[in-house]
Image (cartoon, rainbow, N blue to C red):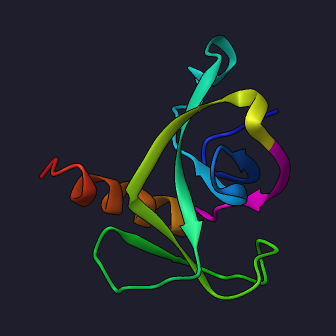
Amino acid sequence: MIHRGGVYEAELPGAGPHPVVVLTREEAIPVLNSVTIALVTSTRRGHPAEVRLSGEQLDLHDESVINCDDLATVPKRLLGRSRGYLSVGELANLDRALRIALDLG
């Protein structure tokens, strides 16, 4: 089952396997064929639209970030194995970073 705040291995066209975080609201996931995701990367720039993650906790190679400036909507079938879930604190930081990235005030 796919959940908001879940970190999954996604087979992205042109990028190959890549960790992503699901952003779609929980209630919508079962009725949609696609979900909105943010890419997880080990390239840290220190932007306010990034969320730092513990690489060890989520089976990532390095300390990584969620890049909320790099969003996409992909078919659910592209999501593979789960790497884990964001903590409550990381979800709060994700919401804050999304407001910044989308200029929602």
Pick the residue in front: 70 or 15: 15
Q: Nearer the viewer, residue 87 or 50?
A: 50
Is residue 82 depicted above or below 44 in this figure?
Answer: above
State the residue at coordinates (82%, 32%). 1
Q: Residue at x 76, y 71 (%)?
A: 58
User: How many tags in the picture?
Assistant: 0
Q: Horizontally, is 46 left or right of 40 in the view?
A: left
* Residue shown at 73% from the left, 48% from the top: 10
- Report the side of 87 relative to 71 (left or right): right
Residue found 57% across the figure and 73% down from its top? 41
Q: Nearer the viewer, residue 34 or 17?
A: 17
Quarter of the rendering containing residue 29? top right
In percent of width and height, residue 50 lies at 40, 72
Front in this rendered view, residue 15 or 94: 15
For this orientation, the residue located farthest to the top is 31
Q: Which residues are magenta?
A: 80-89
| Residue 82 belongs to magenta span | yes
Please name the predominant secondary structure of the magenta segment in the image.
strand
Identify whether 1 is placed above or below 55: above
Could you tell me residue 66's position as x and y percent? 51, 67
Q: What percent of the width, then of the height, locates residue 86?
A: 64, 62
